[in-house]
Amino acid sequence: MADTVHYRPKAGEIPTSPGVYRFRDATGRVLYVGKANSLRARLSNYFAPLASLHERTRRMVLSADSVDWTVVGSEFEALQLEYTWIKEYDPPFNVKFRDDKSYPYLAITLGEPVPRVLVTRNHKITGARYFGPYTKVWAIRETVDQMLKAFPMRSCSDTTYKRAEQTGRPCLLGDIGKCVAPCVGRVSKEQHKSVALDFASFMGGNDSRYIADLTAKMKKAAGDQDYEAAARFRDQLGALEAALSKSTIVLQDDVDVDIFGIAHDELAAAVQQFIVRRGRIRGVRSWVVDKELDLDLAALVDTVVQNAYDDATPPREVIVPELPADARELELLLSGIRAERGERAGRVAIRTAQRGDKAALAQTVTSNAQNALILYKTRRSGDFVARSQALADIQDALKMPDAPLRMECYDVSHLSGTNIVASMVVFEDGLPRKDQYRRFSIPESTDDTESIYQTLTRRLANIDQETTRAGDEDQAVKKFAYRPNLLIVDGGQPQVAAAARALEEAGVTDIRLCGIAKRLEEIWLPDSDYPVILPRNSDALFLIQRIRDEAHRFAISYQRQRRKNDISSVLEDIPGLGPSRIRELLRHFGSVKQLRAAEPAAIGEVKGVGPATAEVIARKLRGG
């Protein structure tokens, strides 16, 4: 392999100024767009010896045939130009956004002579003001229905409005008081627009003022014995309170903030955005990001925040899980978007939440992102067409004679060399067969490769025992059901070599073997100096990653169970400690590690544990 690529520019040709660079293939297509505070420093990273590059970066550099750059005046200008070029060229190696859904918004068409309120997914209505997004159409329709009782503005289509103008008869909403009927002249267009502006102001967060005004009007009307007006104000107040009850209060009523949570792995990232206005959650968005190059959390935050405001106006405060390197320039970009869309002047601040209510809400948003990532992976693996394609692609990539309809994956887990366990998980037709998962206890081992060898040796000892005698009938062996097409181990070349040794000693030659290295997601085959690289967004890599993650989860859960049982058995030997007190100790400290590190005085604070017993527990757990 050559040290670098043929199109590498000379170091002196690359300026040290801020700028934006583009990698292109032989046809001129833009493959990747990036920005840099110093073009020379950044580009030199791509032209390091190929063997030292991250695998995905190496693949991008080798796919390209040229690189060019544009010098700009500042890092902020570089950010703006990078954003523009990514939108224009849609480079395949930049982060790909895929919205889970097309979200409904509540829109008020303030640019029209007679504004209308509607539920829409169209973000390009001229002069409209948008609220949301909302996760459910029925929820926003219920909100509109309640709001029309307090702000009876037009919600009918243009056809219905014109028909009412021609006939002089309002529609049903005008008859039941949910529209002031400007179509038939009950109010002027200016008066109707005032109602629409109040509707928009209320939805924008000025809810407390309207509640207070209606309450005062209701009390005054009741005091004047105008009970009909008082009843009308009461009904409007009830409608507003019913609409507000659908928005959860999470922060103080003067807080406008967007909070982002991101959960990611080597292939994808799930993003959650909570839109909080006047302390209430007014909307929630979630979408998935495909990762082509290896990006850390800060780089993901940078890209996510840039793309989040294509069709929305940023608030004065944005909370993210980690600050990107160019946070200051990103603040200027969002401030410019805010000013362009007619909001009040003021710089957007990008922060992380360290403590308090915002930090607690940020944790909730991140938890939602983690759940969304799990759901995305589960739904993707449940697609029959995608699974079939994944199995076919794995067959081609590993040069297998048949598709791997049964795959077994193995992983090892331990704690500093103690409580060594291994897991075997089974996928058939691309789906997990949890009834055939198996766990292995490994009494003694020198390292992970030896543990893999022992585990596979035990598995392969039963590889041909597909049936066993049970009385006079043959029954399927439940311990190891039948031969797999593909064995997968969690690890790279050393782990694959250990598994291959076990296969050779067992005399098994018709089962394909591979390993998946977690950091780079490379597929390693026995006796191969170079890995098999599957496309980053391919269903094949996704399936192999999922079975590897499932094996890791299963091994970790068993290892934790072993650790818990070990410490329980140690505690059971202490006089005066029964099952209930042992449970109380573990519940109080939360983990075995914290219990081992606790001082006797802290252990003595647990209910039912005295000072003398606490001393014995501390001494016992520390090997005294």
Image (tube, helix red, strand yellow):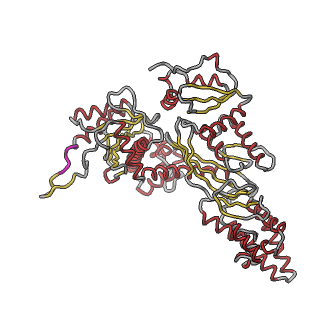
Tell me where residue 7 appears, x and y as whole percent: 55, 21
Q: Is residue 102 left or right of residue 576?
A: right
Quadrant where the image shows the C terminus? top left
Q: Can the viewer see residue 180 in this picture?
A: no
Tell me where residue 507 appears, x and y as whole percent: 21, 35
Instruction: Classify 396 as above or below 377.
Output: above
Quadrant where the image shows the N terminus? top left
* x 47%, y 23%: residue: 51
Q: Can the viewer see residue 218 in this picture?
A: yes
Q: Nearer the viewer, residue 49 or 515?
A: 49
Q: Nearer the viewer, residue 134 or 605?
A: 134
Quarter of the image where one finds residue 225: bottom right
Quarter of the image where one finds residue 253: bottom right
The magenta region covers 462-467
Quarter of the image where one finds residue 449: top left
Pick out the residue farthest to the right: 224
Most prominent secondary structure in the magenta stretch? loop
Instruction: Classify 256 as above or below 350.
Output: below
* x 32%, y 40%: residue: 487
Q: Is residue 467 left or right of residue 306?
A: left
Tell me where residue 423 appears, x and y as whole percent: 35, 44
All told, the count of numbered labels is 0
Pick out the residue farthest to the front: 166
* x 26%, y 38%: residue: 457
Tell me where residue 258 appears, x and y as whole percent: 68, 50
Q: Nearer the viewer, residue 455 or 519?
A: 519
Q: Is residue 31 magenta?
A: no
